[in-house]
Image: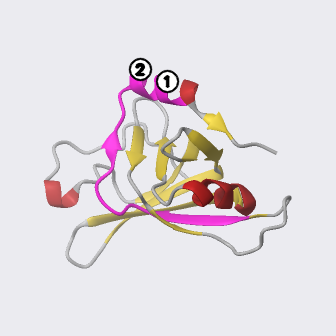
Amino acid sequence: MRRFKNRCEGKIAMSNWIPFLEGEYVVEQAFILAPDNRAVAIEDASIEVFQVSDGRRQLKGNGRIRNIRLVELLEDSDDLDLVLDLGDEFKYRLKKPKLQSGKFFAPDAKSTLHFRPAGPWEQIPQADFEYLISRLNLISE
């Protein structure tokens, strides 16, 4: 897998909002975030950028998560966001992404979480990202 550094193209059209070349990339940090700033960390996350038949690039990703923690977030809100730190200045927030995970809810069980954006992602400036991370209330073990 590659890192994002120097993998960004120049200006992009709104219909093709993914500015990165095709490939699979490591995600340094990833979090599922509820509106009240409670969050769950996603382990071993990665994303894949690929081109579909009409020439647009798409994005899909995955990582490992404790399903029971995701259920805790979903008990209070269905409006979860995904925050991705791809290194350097490449930090993004995906509003209400499409999430798919296993259905095994033992407290110690982890499974693969698959995610896809439901719309364009928004880049987060470094200072805003640091502020956001400092306010997270991580649901842990």
Tell me where residue 123 appears, x and y as whole percent: 33, 38
Identify which residue, 51 or 137, lies in the foreground.
137
Helix, strand or loop status at disc 1: helix
Identify residue for label 1: 130
Tell me where residue 14 appears, x and y as whole percent: 15, 54
Q: Which quadrant of the structure image shows residue 102?
A: bottom right
Identify which residue, 69 or 76, lies in the foreground.
76
Q: Could you tell me which residue is drawn at 49 percent across and 54 percent down?
A: 80
Magenta residues, start to end: 111-133
Question: Label 2 sits on what residue type?
Answer: Ala
Identify residue for label 2: 127
Residue 6 seen in the current view? yes
* Quarter of the C terminus within the rendering: top right
In the image, taking residue 113 as reference, residue 115 lies left or right, namely: left
Q: Could you tell me which residue is drawn at 60 percent across and 41 percent down?
A: 38
Residue 115 inside the magenta-drawn segment: yes
Q: Could you tell me which residue is drawn at 17 percent across and 49 percent down?
A: 12
